[in-house]
Amino acid sequence: MIDLESQPALVVGGGKVALRRVRTLLEAGAKVTLVAPEASTELIRLAGAKQIAWRKKIFASDDLGEAWVVVAATDDPEVNRFVAEAAGPRRLVNVADQPELGNFRVPVRLQRGRLIFSVSTGGASPILARKIRDDLAEQYDQSWEEKLDRLYEERRQMKASGWSQAERKERLRRLVEELITDM
Ligand SMILES: C[C@@]1(CC(=O)O)C2=NC(=C\c3[nH]c(c(CCC(=O)O)c3CC(=O)O)Cc3[nH]c(c(CC(=O)O)c3CCC(=O)O)/C=C3\N/C(=C\2)[C@@H](CCC(=O)O)[C@]3(C)CC(=O)O)/[C@H]1CCC(=O)O
Ligand SMILES: NC(=O)c1ccc[n+]([C@@H]2O[C@H](COP(=O)([O-])OP(=O)(O)OC[C@H]3O[C@@H](n4cnc5c(N)ncnc54)[C@H](O)[C@@H]3O)[C@@H](O)[C@H]2O)c1
């Protein structure tokens, strides 16, 4: 939930994990550069469509440039370690196969408009994290996007009204209960 809009991000590696990270970074509005000698068809397509810049080469430390976020997602643990070391402690660094070498991990995410779920199992089981996400997706279906907009609007109006905090709290609590009963 960090604001990455227009921030430079570097993804090292061109496989399945790199593609997942590239998608997440693009959704967050980051300017993504990919460094990899080979890349998957979808990554090549994104590069062709100019959504990412692709340096078709193996990683070297001068690829880091101004990158604020760095992802090491090659299939070579030594390369991933080298990327993390070269990136240093002053950037956001994610390492796909040795998370302890980086300083952030990637949870599973589910978004319903203003409502965002983030599920992590602390490295225990990404498969369980995904299953919990799928369960939440069923429980909180698309209708929650609108429900959240309604809550947002009501709360905004109440804040502008002359009601006491206690009155506001009680009304908002009831509204949330109505929405949940409606599920
Ligand atoms: C949630 C998700 C997000 C994403 O990556 O986008 C994610 N892994 C996903 C899938 C997945 N990962 C793995 C498999 C193969 C089956 C298995 O082994 O379970 C599958 C299934 C698949 O790929 O289909 C294997 C695996 N994963 C990690 C290691 C290394 C290690 O743990 O040391 C290895 C062993 C590699 C090996 O040995 O080969 C590490 C991490 N994986 C994390 C997140 C972080 C911890 C999150 C948490 O604690 O919950 C962390 C620490 C990385 C990080 O923070 O960057 C994504 C769900 C995608 C979705 O459905 O949306
Ligand atoms: N975090 C997760 O969710 C998760 C899930 C599965 C696997 N993994 C781990 O993540 C890593 C990547 O997995 P994958 O399935 O994406 O791998 P992959 O084999 O699909 O892709 C590896 C990529 O790394 C590139 N590469 C290799 N050496 C390089 C170098 N020196 N510089 C730049 N690029 C280089 C290759 O060209 C290739 O594009 C593996 O270590 C795997 O064990 C993590």
Image (tube, helix red, strand yellow):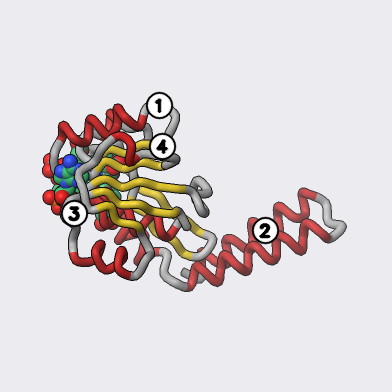
Left or right of 57? Residue 114 is: right
Residue under circle 4? 92
Q: Of label 2 and label 1, which has the lower sequence position?
A: 1
Residue under circle 3? 15
How much space separates mark 2 and mark 3, taking CA atoms? 46 Å
When asked about the image quadrant of residue 155, the answer is bottom right
Label 4 residue SS: strand
How much space separates mark 1 and mark 3, taking CA atoms? 25 Å
Q: Residues within 10 Å of mark 3 (few under 14, many from 20)?
A: some
* Amino acid type assigned to the residue bearing label 4 in the image: Leu
Q: Pointer 1 and pointer 3: residues touching (CB < 8 Å)?
A: no
* Amino acid type assigned to the residue bearing label 1 in the image: Pro
* Amino acid type assigned to the residue bearing label 3 in the image: Gly
Q: Which mark, by number, is residue 172?
A: 2
Q: Which dot, 2 or 4, sits closer to the camera?
A: 4
Q: Position of residue 110 (x, y in %)?
A: 39, 59
Label 2 residue SS: helix
Q: Pointer 2 and pointer 1: residues touching (CB < 8 Å)?
A: no
How much space separates mark 3 and mark 4, taking CA atoms? 21 Å
Residue under circle 1? 89
Q: Residue shown at 34%/45% (left/top)?
A: 106
When asked about the image quadrant of residue 137, the answer is bottom left
Q: Pointer 3 and pointer 4: residues touching (CB < 8 Å)?
A: no
Disc 3 residue lies near ligand 2 with CB under 8 A: yes
Q: Residue shown at 20%/38% (left/top)?
A: 97
Label 3 residue SS: loop
